[in-house]
Amino acid sequence: VGKNGSGKTTIMNIINGNTDYEGNLEKNDITICKFNQIEEIQDTAQNYLIDYQNYDYEKENIIHQLIDMFELDSNILLKQFNTLSGGQKSIIRLIKTLSSKSDLLLLDEPTNHLDLESIQALNNSLINFKGTVLFTTHDHEFAQTVANRVIELTPKGVIDRHTSFDDYLS
């Protein structure tokens, strides 16, 4: 948590290797997938989600399970990504992230543009996720239901607590 402009996205970009920084960061051979606030894709949703050069049947099954969980019509896969609504774009990008088989998911404002049902589907996916999730959000309920550790960035330094979001606030 932290005010806008406090560096939350920058920290995620450093962890993901997208930003130069001075210092040491040990990743200990983990796989990372980052969900960005904004990402434009010039392809169909299906081609964005499925890597046909390195086809993985299990991953495609996971993608279709997530499509069902998010209650999307499977015909959405045939559409050009840039013709989708903001919520549909977010869901497709979340499906790509959730199906990545990564150890660490970096989610930068994942609930933006989502309706309540989609947020609930995302919550359920993250609660069942076996790895680590680092996220930023303005959605209090999402933070409360998903987080079990809160790291706050303040002008005086970092506050790190293993607790729920509501317990941290109180």
Image: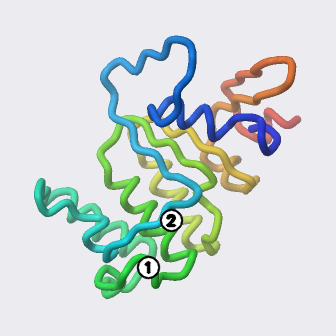
In the displayed structure, 165 sits above or below 56; it is: above
In the displayed structure, 55 sits above or below 108; it is: below
In the displayed structure, 100 sits above or below 13; it is: below
> How many C-alpha atoms fall within 10 Å of the one at disc 2: few (<14), some, or many (≥20)?
some
Image coordinates of residue 99 in percent, x first then y, are 32, 55
Image coordinates of residue 19 in percent, x first then y, are 52, 32
Residues 82 and 92: in front is 82
Q: Locate residue 106 relative to residue 156 in the image: left or right.
A: left
Q: Which mark is drawn over residue 121?
A: 2
Residues 97 and 24: in front is 24
Q: Residue at x 28, y 70 (%)?
A: 64
Q: Earlier in the sequence, mark 2 or mark 1?
A: 1
Quadrant of the snapshot with the N terminus: top right
Q: Which mark is drawn over residue 71?
A: 1
Q: Residue at x 40, y 53 (%)?
A: 97
Q: Residue at x 54, y 81 (%)?
A: 85
Q: Which mark is drawn over residue 142?
A: none
Mark 1 lies on a secondary structure that is: loop
Quadrant of the snapshot with the C terminus: top right
Task: Tell me which corner region of the image, top left, top right, bottom left or bottom right, holds residue 110.
Answer: bottom right
Tell whether label 1 touches label 2 (CB within 8 Å). Answer: yes
For badge 2, the amino acid type reads Ala
Q: Find the residue positioned furthest to the top.
A: 24
> How many C-alpha atoms fall within 10 Å of the one at disc 1: few (<14), some, or many (≥20)?
few
For badge 1, the amino acid type reads Glu
Mark 2 lies on a secondary structure that is: helix
Q: Locate residue 60 relative to residue 1 in the image: left or right.
A: left
In the displayed structure, 149 sits above or below 72; it is: above
Per the model, the C-alpha gap separating discs 2 and 1 is 9 Å
